[in-house]
């Protein structure tokens, strides 16, 4: 048996120091740990640390200038006052704060109220499970829906790494649904469904970010939303809707898929990490689908997700729930109002980035370089296509020689692709940094294009202007 | 293809109301959801709700009378002051509180300091990963270590449901290591290891609660600890040490396995849920094992666990980390000191329960009834053997006719067993409740024994007095 030991060190107990311990072999650990997706992220972090002076368009973290440490206390206090107003005794409030809470969460009513006023989503509190960020919600939903190797998860491609990661952990098969230049296509999704069925696999769910997607920045239009819902119902497919950027984007967002859902095909993954408090790690899932067991008894999918949650985190931090609930109570559930300034800030950053790109890479220049990018109206990300390979070596040259960092798009294609794409995040930079960063990026692109011989032909497809 | 739909409702999109949605079939969800372990817990909760007047020895939750809601603010403030003392600017502190933090956690130094002063465990902060309770730590460790169906997790049997649950989620094979009357036995463990190897499976790790175990209440003695460590090293087995009750028990605890570990065989799972703040959901794992990849590069197991955590919860709530760190800083890391009153409270509750049992079921009486129990010196639980089946029907009769609730031991045997055992938790009851509860329990046992015909023969083995 291959193992940690070089040999059988019988009787050596107590003799070896911790320093001398032989180490486990990485190949003896679960495959998810060695997956390229994770190694890519590690590489990106290393580059960022190695070149601290570089301007980084890589991190998708929210700008935190609108947050105030002292307000944390006020938000928690507001939630405690809310419990008092609802007749909670000091003992009950102590229990609510200190004890293990219900697995599904203790602020579900407040979340349900907020969804009604802000998102036109009207669901009972019982259909909500509060999670440790949307990441845990993904894990719970995937675990519930995927029963074995014959089930497959469809993912928009390119795709957020969080869903790919959760699938890796659970050894879940993925089928990519390529996003065409023009944005999401029902025809492509239908083709993948039929292909997977023909292979004998059961497409269980389709993961999609309909608004200002991470990483592509694309938004699904109203007509395509209706078609997607119809397709999902027809093919017995659940839609996993994840939309963390809609309330931190300027303008009125399109209706969520969940608010349009009449057939119970949409499971909505919610996040407060961009809108309320990233570090608190509070998200939720709306799972109002009915589950029927073999004796005809029914439950909600949310009930079943709670069971899984009891094996993952037991419950979500009461303190984190308190601070999020207190914040929601302070604006009567209107997260959109709370984020009006942030949405305008991000919108300006996006416009600033697009303006700078236009200035440094005007039409004829970018045509000559074989460069193009899309023009999202919101969200944190835009994507760019270039004529050279945007691999780790290119990223290192970009950081080292030009002082600018971006994310290779191939990180977002778990099954290959994105070799000539890069993602720019605009969420964490000042206008000055954006201006300087784009100038550096343009210089890098020019040099890199020259490096590979002038103009290597048109870049591959997969990105375009957003409707 | 079997699916959610009764038929192919092509074109019905928008017509069906949410009420009319057909529901998913439970058999189409992952098997973990329908596992008897989870259904048992659901049943127990239902019984508890249905008989609110019953005295319940079921919940393992800590007593919260020592907690004070207002102190939450002080603990967070103390952590913020600590960051200021270490030179943190307001911006840095805002970022530390509000932003996504490092996946491995931001209070690892404080935890490492506490482990040094309180547990004689001296590990670098880098070998610690802060988790959403010990539950997430279990999931991370199992996911890292178990690569597929040929790997097997050994668990002490009876066993805490949290580890069984995490294994279920990940489709991990379990092999029970029966706990004899006299407590943990290396001989039994070794036999299971050899048996599993003979079956072609690789025993990867052994999960054990060495101090006042949940559910049995048993503690592993000093000699057996040394033997266990030697055995683990010899058979290339990791020990997953979980010991949430040691610092809330009276007297000086035995050294942890981790503090005795010289060969790097112990992964220690830590929890602040019994000692500091249950609802905050903060635990940790010490994973200082070295990992070697196929190019000879090394990392710590903690690094690999962080990668997995990035796919489960991304990071642990900064607010929860702050309140735990603030509490630890307030007592210079001495959790034992912080819990001196609680430990004495639980110790008194255990002694009170044992006295009441002795009084209501004196030696000759209990011999006639075929009843016995163990006598833990700490922890939250003791176990009892009776002559009748302690199944769900018996539990319902106990709650309905006698007003007393307990936990059937069979819930803690994932692969069968415990049919005549019951677990009593002493952590959440007042002395008066214990007195009345034990009286009711004795009445139930007498009636139940009569019901099955006087004295049905000796109960099965598996529990005894604790050394």
Image (cartoon, coloured by chain):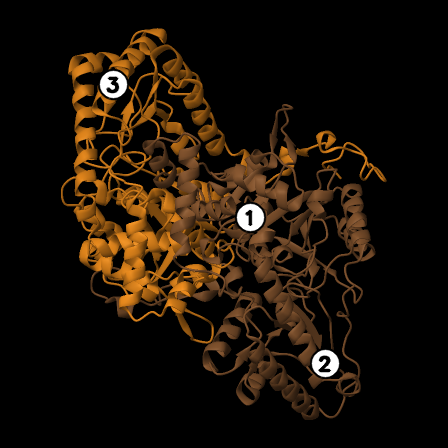
Chain colours: A brown, B orange
Looking at the picture, tell me which residue is in the foreground, A362 or A150.
A362
Tell me how far mark 2 sits from mark 1, CA to CA: 39 Å
Residue occupied by mark 2: A358
Have a look at marks 2 and 3 and say if they share a chain: no
Residue under pointer 1: A137
Q: Nearer the viewer, mark 1 or mark 3?
A: 1
**Few, some or many residues within 10 Å of mark 1 (<14, 14–19, 20+):** many
Label 3, residues with CA under 10 Å away: few <14, some 14-19, many ≥20:
many
Residue A260 visible at all: yes
Q: Horizontal and vertical percent for residue B416? A: 42, 31
Q: Nearer the viewer, mark 2 or mark 3?
A: 2
As rendered, which of A247 and B63 lies closer to the eye? A247
Residue matched to label 3? B438
Disc 1/disc 3 C-alpha distance (Å): 42 Å
Chain identifier of the residue bearing label 2 in the image: A
Which subunit holds the residue at mark 3?
B
């Amino acid at each position: 048996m291959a193992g940690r030991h070089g040999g059988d060190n019988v009787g050596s107990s107590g003799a070896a120091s911790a320093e001398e311990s032989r180490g486990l072999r990485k190949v003896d650990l679960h495959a998810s740990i060695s997956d390229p997706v994770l190694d890519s992220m590690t590489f990106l972090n290393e580059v960022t640390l190695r070149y601290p002076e570089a301007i980084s368009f890589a991190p998708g973290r929210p700008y935190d200038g609108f947050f105030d440490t002292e307000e944390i206390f006020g938000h928690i206090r507001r939630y405690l006052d809310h419990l008092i107003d609802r007749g909670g005794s000091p003992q009950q409030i102590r229990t609510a704060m200190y004890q293990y809470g219900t697995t599904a969460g203790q602020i579900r009513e407040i979340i349900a109220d907020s969804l009604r006023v802000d998102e036109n989503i009207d669901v009972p509190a019982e259909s909500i499970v509060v999670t440790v960020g949307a990441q845990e919600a993904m894990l719970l939903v995937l675990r519930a829906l995927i029963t074995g190797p014959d089930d497959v998860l469809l993912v928009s491609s390119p795709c957020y790494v969080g869903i790919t990661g959760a699938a890796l952990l659970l050894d879940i098969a993925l089928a990519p649904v390529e996003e065409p230049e023009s944005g999401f296509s029902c025809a492509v999704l239908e083709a993948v469904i039929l292909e997977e069925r023909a292979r004998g696999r059961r497409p269980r769910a389709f993961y999609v970010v309909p608004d200002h997607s991470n990483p592509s920045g694309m938004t699904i239009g109203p007509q395509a939303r209706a078609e997607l819902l119809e397709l999902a119902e027809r093919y017995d497919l659940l839609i996993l809707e994840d939309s963390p950027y809609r309330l931190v984007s300027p303008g009125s967002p399109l209706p969520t898929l969940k608010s349009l859902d009449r057939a119970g095909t949409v499971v909505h993954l919610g996040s407060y990490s961009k809108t309320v408090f990233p570090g608190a790690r509070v998200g939720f899932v709306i799972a109002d689908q009915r589950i029927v067991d073999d004796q005809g008894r029914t439950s909600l999918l949310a009930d079943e997700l709670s069971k899984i949650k009891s094996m993952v985190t037991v419950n979500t931090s009461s303190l984190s729930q308190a601070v999020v609930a207190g914040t929601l109570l302070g604006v009567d559930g209107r997260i959109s109002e709370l984020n009006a300034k942030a949405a305008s800030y991000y919108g300006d950053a996006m416009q600033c980035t697009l303006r700078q790109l236009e200035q440094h890479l005007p039409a004829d220049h970018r045509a000559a370089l074989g460069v193009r990018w899309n023009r999202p109206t919101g969200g944190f990300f835009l994507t760019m296509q270039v004529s050279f390979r945007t691999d780790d070596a290119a990223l290192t040259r970009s950081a080292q020689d030009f002082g600018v960092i971006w994310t290779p798009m191939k990180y977002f294609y778990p099954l290959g692709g994105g070799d000539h794409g890069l993602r720019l995040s605009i969420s964490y930079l000042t206008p000055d940094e954006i201006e300087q960063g784009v100038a550096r990026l343009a210089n890098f692109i020019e040099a890199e294009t020259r490096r590979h011989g002038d103009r290597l032909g048109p870049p591959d497809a997969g990105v375009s202007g957003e409707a």
